[in-house]
Image: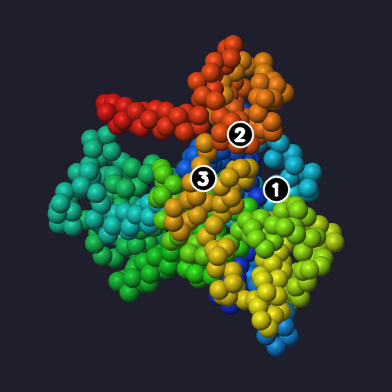
Amino acid sequence: MEIIRSNFKDNLNKVYEAIEEADFLAIDGEFSGISDGPSVSTLTNGFDTPEERYQKLKKHSMDFLLFQFGLCSFKYDHTEAKYIMKSFNFYIFPKPFNRSSPDVKFVCQSSSIDFLANQGFDFNKVFRNGIPYLNQEEERQLREQYDEKRSQANGAGTLSYISPNATKCPVTIPEDQKKFIERVVEQIEDLIQNEENKSLQLEPCTGFQRKLIYQTLSWKYPKGIHVETLETEKKERYIVISKVDEEERKRREQQKQAKEQEELSDAVGFSRVIHAIANSGKLVVGHNMLLDVMHTIHQFYCPLPEDLSEFKELAACVFPRLLDTKLMASTQPFKEIINNTSLAELEKRLKEIPFNPPEVESAEGFPSYDTASEQLHEAGYDAYITGLCFISMANYLGSFLSPPKNHVSARSKLIEPFFNKLFLMRVMDIPYLNLEGPDLQPKRDHVLHVTFPKEWKTSDLYQLFSAFGNIQVSWIDDTSAFVSLSQPEQVQIGKCYWNHLIVRFACWHNKQTLKGLLLSLLKFLSP
């Protein structure tokens, strides 16, 4: 089901219902880019530590926009022995809610935009019809704006403009605004004296002038009138003053507050879906989902914390149970029988022996996907395929039981070993980021940090280390790389070859850590 701004409110309860009844949820995101660094190595290196990878993604990926979010709910029908699926494809865009709303700035990566365009991605649905959103801090600020406006209307504005006893004392009006306020008061006096006229529309004015009007009228006319700010087609704001009795005034105030609450909900927008997923506590499945999780938290909750340990705590609060199908497929007992773990190839492999494709049917009123058409890189479809892959692999684990089980639920202990471990791309010896505890710390005694001239290529490094047999090269930048030898005892330290330098990985890493600590200390001490 395609969800854009115009049909979001009408379908929100369907989304809530799908989340509530699901056995598990599958998600996927499409972004305006992946990395703002000069090269792939800026984002990934074969010998990144989990902390380093987190910092790289945080620095080089979070300024992109998650603008399409796929959500699929899967509920198992025990009677029919099949899953019932509901799919949602959300288009998201941070359209400013009002003049004081965040005017979000984001970056695009030409290769990513070109790739999505070639896949038939409709960017108009994002930029013209995308669902708005606010993170928690932005929502709090908007609530405070409404509270401030309400307090002004009730004569309890900020101390900058009125005295502490505002309801009893006149408002302090700046000299250059006195004539303006006097004219407004004269118009209101005429309105009150004229029995035929019921309301008065003032000329558009500045926000500061509107504030003075509200404060003056709340003091001078505590009863008998209702004051409201409206907006012209040209987005100019003006005040309408109406003569009302107390009962009518209260009714209008209640209407206004209800409208404000509705506007606030509209502004929070898509974030309400993420909150519902988080509050459900349901298992959330994704494929190679570290970036999806980071973007979702960063965009709809709060800016990412400075260090990895804080991120893990935050992720556990937002998503208590995560499962990464790419990691699952790369782990025993699957890694020996699955050669390619890309989403498209994984879905194809899981249709073959020894796996059984799951029985999945779209719920009534929801469109179905045809895997033969391969709608890859539509977030809703990718979420659907991810869900299918999870079901197939989970059910395969049931074949090891005695007696074997054809269906393994999302709550089975068989899949718990895969919970809260997110696949780390292109890291040679740390397969995943562990959200529930310390990360793996493999020995890297066989790894060297090598510095060399900018003109060197990978073949030059192979030539340099030809005496050591097989090596693996992981580039850092144009003048440095990690070289992994096949045996730790082969390592020879402290040799200088022409104009390049070789040091142990541990020595280099300790130096980098110390450099980082010193920079942090200098930043802290600087005025």
The structure residue drawn at horizontal position 31% and vertical position 27%, both measured from the top left corner, is: 522
- Residue 408 rendering spot, x and y as whole percentages: 65, 76
Q: Say what amino acid the circle numbered 3 marks.
A: Pro
- Residue 156 rendering spot, x and y as whole percentages: 24, 55
- Residue 106 rendering spot, x and y as whole percentages: 56, 39
Q: Nearer the viewer, residue 364 or 38?
A: 38
Q: Nearer the viewer, mark 1 or mark 2?
A: 2
Please tell me how many numbered marks the rendered image carries. 3
Q: Which residue is mark 2?
A: 484
Distance between mark 1 and mark 3 Cα atoms? 47 Å
The structure residue drawn at horizontal position 66% and vertical position 34%, both measured from the top left corner, is: 472
Q: Residues within 10 Å of mark 3 (few under 14, many from 20)?
A: few
Distance between mark 2 and mark 3 Cα atoms? 13 Å
Q: Which residue is mark 1?
A: 124
The structure residue drawn at horizontal position 53% and vertical position 38%, both measured from the top left corner, is: 444
Q: Furthest residue to the top?
A: 498
Q: Nearer the viewer, mark 1 or mark 3?
A: 3
Q: Tags 1 and 2 in contact by the CB under 8 Å rule? A: no
Q: Is residue 313 visible?
A: yes
- Whichever of callouts 2 and 3 sits on the residue coming sooner in the sequence is 3
Q: Quadrant of the C terminus?
A: top left
The quarter holding residue 403 reads bottom right
Distance between mark 1 and mark 2 Cα atoms? 47 Å
Q: Say what amino acid the circle numbered 1 marks.
A: Asn
The quarter holding residue 425 reads top right
Q: Residues within 10 Å of mark 2 (few under 14, many from 20)?
A: many
SS at circle 1: helix
- Whichever of callouts 1 and 2 sits on the residue coming sooner in the sequence is 1
Q: Which residue is mark 3?
A: 442
Left or right: residue 286 compared with residue 382: left
Q: Give the answer, above or below, for where 259 lies relative to 490.
A: below
